[in-house]
Amino acid sequence: MKTVLHSLLILVVLSFAGTGRAATPNPTEQIKPFVSKVVDQLKDPSFKKDTVDNRIDKIVTLVSERFDFEEMSKRVVGKPWQRLTLAQRQEFATLFAKLLGHVYIDKVDTYVAMKIEFGKEQLKGDRAEVKTMFVDATKSIPVSYVMILKGDKWMAYDVFVEGISLVRNYMEQFKGIQQDKLISTLEIKLQELKAESERKGATP
Amino acid sequence: MKTYLRVVLLLCLALCGNTAQATESSGETSVLDDSFYESTPNEDTVPDPFEHFNRLMFEVNDVTYTWVMEPVASVYSRTLPEDIRQVADNFCYNLQEPVRFINALLQLRFSDAGIVLTRFAVNTIGGVGGLGDVAGTEFGFKRVEAGLGETLEYWGVGDGFYLVMPVLGATTLREFAGTTVDGLSMTPYYFFADSWREGAAIYMGRRVNNLSLRLGEYEGLKQLTIDPYAALRDGYFQSRAQSRKHSAPRTDDKL
């Protein structure tokens, strides 16, 4: 009887344990393979030869695996975000992702030449910060990713380069732009960037 | 031997003690809190009443950079190898260490003052007059920043207002006053400059040398911005706040 009760007790405990919250995934372990994938993509010789639009699409698709552009855009736009329609929010996030895509395609050689070292991480509830260091022969650039836990995935919504928050910097730039001009401003900027990238690509 | 020397130097610094002010970070908003993105404290507290003038100066600096500074620095960087340019940078940096030492003392950052003094002594003697950064590369004593602008801030002097100055770029009234006094206090070191023109030439030379080590960064920043003026102003304030977190730097290169 005692053995049966004991077994039942263990069973009950185990079934409750099963419904409990799973252990929090490790943000550094999640971001490491992602960074490698981005570097591999940038190193791919065929990537460099592709058109600007294709390169942007490829890199945005890849980066979206670990970057939450809507969380990022929400912070960049600030209070006016609440007044945007769902479609406008999605459009802004898509355009903003493309803008950041230019950071990668225009600086391919810089990033590929650098070694990435992973450092400490900081956890606070569903938020985490993972510190990395981009190192080459002459300099070290500290880069950290600020992330939010969505389901079992850590998604980045801000990047600090040498202690400067990318989101806060864009926040300051969008402050002076009227709500109805947010999307058109991004569209114009992207056209300029595309023309500039194509001009650079055409220059031997 | 190196380890022994480092232990002795650290012991000397420990004896100096450190009664520096409590870290600001204790009361600071964590980057993991949403409130971090609800306001931009520096821009909100430091007014920009001369924005029209500042934007004009920003344009002037942009043109000066694009058509004068950048081409000169590019030619300079192609002419002189990076090692030599780094040596020139080390030399100028070492000359300024006494000014940093005094400012660190005035900010009651005794441990940092000790590091600056150690760096100055080691680099002047072991680095052949400051040409090499032996203290940093061999003994791990990283550069410590301390200027009069920060000293004034420590003693409660406000920023005044935001300013964009020709060539110097983004600053505030207090920081500009601090940089000017720090610069003037350097003049006894320019023993080889007989006039203000030569002094100005040395200053421009230092700017070009420094720029040659960071070529391309400005273009990269400007290209991806919606409003380059606002981006630079925010970058200035964020970068300054970062460089003044002496107790717990977020950009700790040891990770």
Image (cartoon, grey):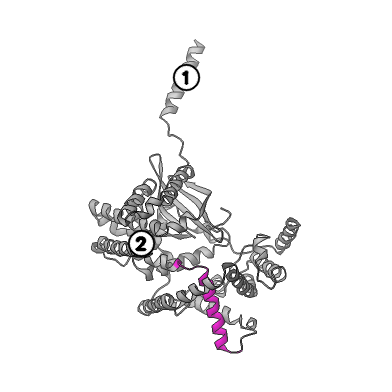
Which circle's residue, 1 or 2, is located before the other in the chain? 1
Considering depth in this image, is A166 or A44 the residue closer to the camera?
A44
Label 1 – label 2 distance at C-alpha:
69 Å
Which residue in the protein does label 1 denote?
A9
Q: Name the residue at 56% across, 72% down.
A: B80
User: What secondary structure is marked by label 1?
Assistant: helix
Quarter of the rendering containing residue B194: bottom right
Q: What segment is highlighted magenta in the picture?
A: B194-217
Answer whether residue B201 is magenta in the image. yes
Considering depth in this image, is A144 or A116 the residue closer to the camera?
A116
Disc 1 with disc 2 on a shared chain:
yes
Magenta-colored segment: predominant secondary structure: helix
x and y percentages locating residue A186 in the rendered image: 29, 61
Q: What crowding class fits label 1: few (fewer than 14 Cα within 10 Å), some (14-19), or many (20 or more)? A: few
User: What secondary structure is marked by label 2?
Assistant: helix
The quadrant of the picture occupied by the N terminus of chain B is bottom right
Which residue appears farthest toward the front when viewing the image? A204
Residue type at mark 2 is: Gly
Look at the picture and state if A3 lies above or below A166: above
Which residue in the protein does label 2 denote?
A201
Determine contact: label 1, label 2, CB under 8 Å: no
Q: Horizontal placement of B247 versus B12: left or right?
A: left
Judging from the image, mark 1 belongs to the subunit labelled A
Look at the picture and state if B47 lies above or below A200: below
The label shown at residue A17 is none
Q: Name the residue at 39% across, 58% down.
A: A103
